[in-house]
């Protein structure tokens, strides 16, 4: 079935969102591998790909790499093999000398992405089996750019000179992963204008789950859809959203003094604090407006929100929701049987040396938290 035909068929919808997180993407991939295995067993299709099950797959930064691979029809194992084979080249912090030396297309990450996605494959390619969302930040306009391949979206209209569907897929993924201080920015030409893009993780959509719900259900995102065949219908029995994290590392600093909070401290602490807060806000919104079936506690006040009542007067929720993630602290790792792993090793975004430990964490999360019952009613 063509993507355009798949989009206008009425019925249940399944969405998959993947957080950003550098090399910690392998943690998410192990969780996704468990999801893939559960769905294969539940459906009886041993060759099922997540793109065949999920109608809409989205990701930010490293999540964009994973999401694009899945939407292309790759098995989780294939993407994980790619990370293990190329991770050391892909997730290496770019120093000042490298920034000056690299052109926009010859640094290692760009080369690896062209290799796996193809240099000529466009966002609108028929190779993509599902809707795909990639979150970027446009540094030129100082704005987040959630870009997708919906043929009915305003900026995907074929007659436009700046039609987004003609943009190279590898370059969009590269732009979404261009974390400041880690990689050079990405310059993308849209029509007659060039824009400079950096990592989508420095927007409020490092976890893109709730944004995906909005884009799939609000009519303004579907202006070109046929009459009566536009946005998808909401409802806890009509839509399932699965959100997969790459691990969080909240850290209280009980010894912090006011005089310690100098310019250098804030430069290092504030960006990560804002990204963590934004990630949690997206998760919290999904649990408020969605029927939360699974998820770790958010804080001591609201807990995990399972069984909570939403703001709608009839108590109904707009979708069903599950969240799989791991807390990369000593307490969090111990709770999943990984207490012998040093949190400092797995909290870094660029530590390729910790890949096997990250894989173990993801595998344990998958075994402990991913359950076939979470997908009941959506097969």
Image (spheres, rainbow, N blue to C red):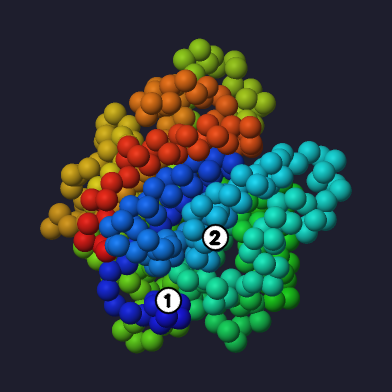
Q: Quadrant of residue 315?
A: bottom left
The residue drawn where x is 58% and y is 84% is: 158
Q: Which residue is mark 1?
A: 222
Label 1: which secondary element = loop
Question: On the rendered image, what quadrant is the N terminus found in?
Answer: bottom left
Which class describes the residues within 10 Å of circle 1: few (<14), some (14-19), or many (20+)?
A: many
The residue drawn where x is 27% and y is 34% is: 303
* Residue nearest the observer in this picture, 150 or 153: 150
* Residue nearest the observer in this picture, 40 or 333: 40
* Residue nearest the observer in this picture, 160 or 123: 123
- Percent across and percent down for residue 359 are 50, 38
- Percent across and percent down for residue 217 are 35, 68
Residue 245 drawn above or below residue 339: below
Is residue 162 shown left or right of residue 129? right
Question: On the rendered image, what quadrant is the C terminus found in?
Answer: bottom left
Q: Which residue is mark 2?
A: 69
Q: Are marks 2 and 1 in contact (CB under 8 Å)?
A: no
- Percent across and percent down for residue 275 are 51, 41
Label 2: which secondary element = helix
Earlier residue among tags 2 and 1: 2
Residue 129 at least partly seen: yes
- Percent across and percent down for residue 360 are 47, 34
Tally the marks: 2
């Amino acid at each position: 079935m063509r993507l355009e035909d798949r989009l206008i068929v009425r019925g249940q919808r399944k969405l998959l969102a993947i957080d950003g997180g550098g090399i910690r993407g392998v943690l998410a991939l192990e969780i996704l591998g468990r999801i893939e295995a559960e769905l294969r067993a539940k459906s009886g299709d041993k060759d099922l790909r997540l793109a065949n099950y999920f109608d809409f797959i989205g990701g930010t930064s490293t999540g964009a790499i994973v999401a694009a691979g899945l939407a292309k029809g790759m098995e989780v194992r294939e993407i994980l093999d790619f990370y293990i084979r190329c991770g050391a080249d892909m997730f290496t912090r770019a120093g000042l000398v490298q920034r000056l030396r690299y052109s926009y297309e010859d640094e290692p990450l760009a080369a690896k992405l062209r290799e796996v996605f193809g240099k000529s494959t466009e966002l609108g390619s028929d190779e993509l089996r599902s809707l795909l969302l990639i979150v970027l930040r446009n540094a030129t306009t100082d704005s987040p750019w959630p870009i997708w391949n919906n043929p009915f979206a305003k900026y995907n209209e074929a007659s436009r000179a700046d039609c987004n569907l003609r943009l190279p897929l590898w370059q969009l993924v590269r732009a979404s992963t261009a974390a400041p201080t880690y990689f050079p920015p990405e310059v993308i030409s849209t029509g007659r204008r060039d824009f400079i893009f950096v990592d989508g993780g420095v927007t409020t959509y490092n976890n893109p789950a709730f944004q995906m719900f909005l884009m799939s259900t609000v009519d303004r995102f579907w202006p070109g859809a046929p009459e009566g065949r536009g946005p998808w219908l909401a409802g806890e029995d009509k839509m399932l959203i699965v959100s997969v994290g790459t691990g969080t590392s909240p850290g209280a600093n009980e010894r912090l003094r006011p005089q310690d909070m100098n310019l250098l401290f804030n430069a290092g602490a504030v960006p990560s604090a804002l990204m963590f807060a934004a990630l949690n806000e997206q998760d919290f919104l999904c649990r408020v407006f969605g029927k939360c079936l699974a998820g770790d506690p958010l804080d001591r006040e609201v807990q995990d929100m399972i069984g909570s009542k939403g703001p709608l007067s009839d108590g109904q929720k707009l979708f069903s929701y599950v969240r799989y993630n791991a807390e990369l602290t000593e307490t969090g790792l111990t709770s999943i049987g990984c207490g012998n792993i040093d949190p400092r090793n797995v909290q870094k975004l660029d530590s390729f040396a910790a890949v096997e430990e990250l894989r173990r964490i993801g595998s344990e999360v998958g075994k402990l938290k991913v359950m076939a019952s979470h997908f009941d009613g959506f097969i």
